[in-house]
Image: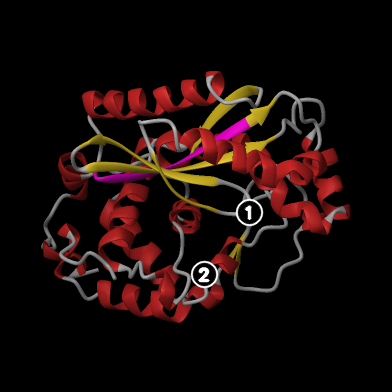
Amino acid sequence: MATGGGLLRSLGPNENLDIFDANNLQMNDSYRASCNAVIDRLVKFLQNNVPIKVKEVVKGGSLGKGTAIRDKSDIDLVLFLSDYHTVKSVKADMTQLLSTLENYLGRYGGCRVVGSTRFSIQVDVSCHALHEHNVDILPACDILGGHGTAAVYGEMARSEDLRHYYSASLVKLQLNFVKVLPTKVMSLIRLVKHWRKSELPSDSGKGRWPTSYILELIVIKKWEDAGRPERFDLKNLLHSFLQALVNYRDLKVVWYKNYDRLYTHHSPPYVIDPANPFNNVMDRCDVWDDVARYARDTLKWPLFRGI
């Protein structure tokens, strides 16, 4: 279940959320450097001690985007493999690739293997006594280097059975989408991550709850709806975000920065991955009515009195 006792719950209507973020959520330089050093050691191990030729490792997730909060962060380490040039070839060898990674990571003292999916090996690493990284390690191939995005999306349109295997290879597009955001939007994303961690249940046996990425995209949409301001009141946009969750059935969110309308045929509600026109990220959650209830309860907190 949720950890409970979230710090936001105790704040009054006159609290400054910028100060709250700086004092409770945002990593300082030394904290960030310590976390990066731990992840860099894991990256070097993957590059030099595993019998898989790795051309490049890209850091995704909250640490890669700059939206990590102090006590816990999620990281995707996408391994772009030298000997693979098509998604089809990666899929064909995925079971063996993951088995090899799991075997060698089990020998590495700096992390603990905790699970796997069809696409990744999952490990935990710690950089502080109270800070743990959940790391997904995903094999991929560089499909963007030699082709434009239009060609890649055309391949995906013709290869429905392979589409899920393209996601890791599109990580750079996801990172580029978030990294250009103003600092204040990053602060709002951290506040939402803190709310998610402290207020939403995490018991996977009782439904699939929204990932940080889904909520992050809704935050960005609400900021855009407000006119893309450089400066804004965090409390007001946090309120707007929660209202969007309450009214989730009305969500129709899509960006055409990387693809055109040809590929986006989704029934509402939808929030389409800005890097993948075939991926409605809302489908990952199957308890949206419960999410709406938690958001509705949060809007009754003292923090939002008077809005």
Asked if one can make out residue 236 in the rendered structure from this viewpoint, the answer is: yes
Q: Nearer the viewer, mark 2 or mark 1?
A: 1
Asked if 107 appears above or below 94 in the picture, the reply is: above
What is the count of numbered marks?
A: 2
Asked if 228 appears above or below 285 in the picture, the reply is: above
The tag on residue 118 is 1
Residue 73 image point, x, y percent: 35, 44
Asked if 298 appears above or below 16 in the picture, the reply is: below
Asked if 10 appears above or below 58 in the picture, the reply is: below
The earlier-in-sequence mark between 2 and 1 is: 1
Secondary structure under badge 2?
Answer: loop
Q: Which residue is mark 2?
A: 285
Residue 205 image point, x, y percent: 42, 74
> What's the magenta bit mostly, secondary-structure-wise?
strand
The magenta-colored residue range is 70-79
Dot 1 alpha-carbon crowd within 10 angstroms: few under 14, some 14 to 19, many 20 or more: few
Dot 2 alpha-carbon crowd within 10 angstroms: few under 14, some 14 to 19, many 20 or more: some
Tag 1: amino acid: Arg
The image quadrant where one finds the C terminus is bottom left
Tag 2: amino acid: Cys
Residue 288 image point, x, y percent: 47, 76
